[in-house]
């Protein structure tokens, strides 16, 4: 692993986690950090454990060893709904829109929570409608009837309803047409401007190198390489070695 | 003459169907959200009726009894869910079937031990009749149908528009994603079980005046409720309600020609035909 400066007091720190699905050993001691407001990429081929790493941070999969820390506090084993309340949002690879709920109801799953007054709710809605105007038009439409790109927007908008400090973004551009991809790229930039940290899992290397400050490269359940994105932009050999492109 | 009988049986079928819908909607809600087939549902119905009997003796009011039974059994449902089902979540469905079946035996025998084998009676809250062709038809029967419809309607409104209703529907569709959105899924499960239990108790009290209250009264109902839940499409609330009325009407019409005991066969025929030709349920859209 080569050197990229990790933040001194990271927002999220994954420390030597081992994760199993049944008997198969998926993560073999993954460690990484994400600083507050930082956009960090996680690259690697299919099946190297990138999504599992995100799921482990979100509490959806429990690691058998190792620890996940959030703002310095150990959160390993906390239920996902508690992590969501602490400020961790998750946009899964398959989007997992509540298909039978309307677009508005999908958003309300994150919006209806204690301590959020009506004005704040409206401000949050106005913000996502500014980013994704199509969602405002489709408010009463069932989530399952949206196109793939619209579902991706809804999944990100839904996560934004939680006012998270970090969003775990799993392959947001997968299967989207180029116009949508650039829109997703813009939204990542916008979230970054707002100070939201992002842990981005992607197959789209140019987008990842463009959007992220640092990148981790995974292979066979471990982080093999860690570098500033700018360094990888100049040195494609590393990318070629781990991604085969 | 036959037309008179058909109309009378239609009214009967709808009345029984609405009570059945009240029992079945709790059952289907619980199955839909946590994949638990609650074999103790009939016992919650029966215990609700007993709590109703006790409260009527103490207060003299049927309506207070209805309310108290609903709340007490909802609370009992919450306790049952937390202690028995929550630890089993995510395991093989067989474990929850065995757990709820065991629970039904415990509750039934508790009722036998506590209240004895002699049936108790819940008096009708009002006793008027009206003339339906050659029959003096009790107003109370119609009131049951309307009350059941009102309770189910309230549940529907709650699920459709209430914040917690959205939580319940989101959790039913995708437990994992609901949890990732900050919805406290374990408590949603507990609340749904409590709501289902409370609805079973309410139907027990409402139906009490028509039959005696005894420790085995839940058995018939839960059996029918299971038929309805399967015919209506497992976990589908609207389907269960439609199937409740459908099955009850079938039985009511069948008993024009055969004895009511034999008319039950019609329900089972409907169940078998559904499982053979449309196992996802009669009252759900064709799966794509």
Image: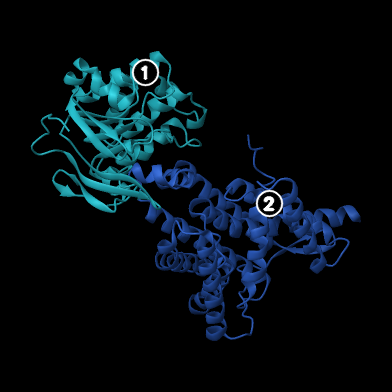
Other-residue count near label 1 (Cα within 10 Å), few / some / many at <14 / 14–19 / ≥20: some
Is the residue A185 above or below the residue A36 in the image?
A: above
- Residue A40, percent from left and from top: 22, 29
Chain A shade in the render: cyan
- Residue A234, percent from left and from top: 19, 15
Residue A122's quadrant in the figure?
top left
According to the image, label 1 marks what residue? A181
Other-residue count near label 2 (Cα within 10 Å), few / some / many at <14 / 14–19 / ≥20: many
Identify the residue at the far left of this view.
A8
Q: Contact (CB < 8 A) between labels 1 and 2?
A: no
* Res B103 seen here: yes
Is the residue B216 above or below the residue B87 in the image?
A: below
Is the residue A75 above or below the residue A43 in the image?
A: below
- Residue displayed at 73% across by 57% down: B248
Identify the residue at the far right of this view.
B1
Residue A224's quadrant in the figure?
top left
Q: Quadrant of the N terminus of chain B?
A: bottom right
Q: CA distance from mark 1 to mark 2?
A: 45 Å
Q: How many marks?
A: 2
Instruction: Name the chain under label 2.
Output: B
Residue A46's quadrant in the figure?
top left
* Res A76 seen here: no
- Residue displayed at 44% across by 30% down: A103
Q: Are marks 1 and 2 on the same chain?
A: no
Label 1, secondary structure: give it. helix
Residue B231 is labelled as 2
In the drawing, does residue A163 fall left or right of residue A149?
A: left
In the image, A135 versus B54, the foreground residue is: A135
């Amino acid at each position: 692993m080569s050197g990229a400066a990790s933040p001194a007091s990271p927002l999220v720190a994954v420390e030597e986690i081992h994760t199993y699905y049944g008997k198969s050993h998926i993560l073999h001691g993954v460690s990484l950090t994400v600083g507050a407001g930082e956009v960090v990429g996680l690259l690697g081929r299919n099946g190297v454990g990138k999504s599992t790493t995100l799921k482990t941070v979100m509490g959806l999969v429990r690691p058998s060893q190792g620890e996940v820390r959030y703002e310095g506090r150990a959160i390993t084993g906390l239920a996902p709904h508690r992590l969501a309340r602490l400020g961790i949002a998750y946009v899964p690879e398959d989007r997992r829109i509540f298909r039978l709920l309307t677009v508005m109801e999908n958003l309300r799953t994150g919006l209806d929570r204690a301590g959020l007054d009506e004005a704040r709710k409206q401000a949050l809605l106005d913000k996502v409608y500014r980013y994704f105007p199509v969602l405002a038009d489709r408010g009463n439409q069932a989530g399952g009837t949206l196109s793939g790109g619209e579902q991706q927007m809804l999944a990100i908008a839904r996560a934004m309803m939680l006012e998270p400090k970090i969003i775990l973004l799993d392959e947001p551009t997968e299967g989207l047409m180029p116009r949508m991809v650039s829109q997703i790229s813009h939204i990542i930039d916008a979230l970054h401007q707002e100070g939201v940290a992002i842990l981005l899992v992607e197959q789209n290397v140019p987008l990842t190198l463009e959007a992220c400050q640092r990148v981790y490269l995974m292979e066979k359940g471990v982080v093999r390489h860690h570098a500033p994105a700018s360094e990888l932009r100049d040195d494609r050999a590393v990318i070629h070695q781990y991604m085969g492109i | 003459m036959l037309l008179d009988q058909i109309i009378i049986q239609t009214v009967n079928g709808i009345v029984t169907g609405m009570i059945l819908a009240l029992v079945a909607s709790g059952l289907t809600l619980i199955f839909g959200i946590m994949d638990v087939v609650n074999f103790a549902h009939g016992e919650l119905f029966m215990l609700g009726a007993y709590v109703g009997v006790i409260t009527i003796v103490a207060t003299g009011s049927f309506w207070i009894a209805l309310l108290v039974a609903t709340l007490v059994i909802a609370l009992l449902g919450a306790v049952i869910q937390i202690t028995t089902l929550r630890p089993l979540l995510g395991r093989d469905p067989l474990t929850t079937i065995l757990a709820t079946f065991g629970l039904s035996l415990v509750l039934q025998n508790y009722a036998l031990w506590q209240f004895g084998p002699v049936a108790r009676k819940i008096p009708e809250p009002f006793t008027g009749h009206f003339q339906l062709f050659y029959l003096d038809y009790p107003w109370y029967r119609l009131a049951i149908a309307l009350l059941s419809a009102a309770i189910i309607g309230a549940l529907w409104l709650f699920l459709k528009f209430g914040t917690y209703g959205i939580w319940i529907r989101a959790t039913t569709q995708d437990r994992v994603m609901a949890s990732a959105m900050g919805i406290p899924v374990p408590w949603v499960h507990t609340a749904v079980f409590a709501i289902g239990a409370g609805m079973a108790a309410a139907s027990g009290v409402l139906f009490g005046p028509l039959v005696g209250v005894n420790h085995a009264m839940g058995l018939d109902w839960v059996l029918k409720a299971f038929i309805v839940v399967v015919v209506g499409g497992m976990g589908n609330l609207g389907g269960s309600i439609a199937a409740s009325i459908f099955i009850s009407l079938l039985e009511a019409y069948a008993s024009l020609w055969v004895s009511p005991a034999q008319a039950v066969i019609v329900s089972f025929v409907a169940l078998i035909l559904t499982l053979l030709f449309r196992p996802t349920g009669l009252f759900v859209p064709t799966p794509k």
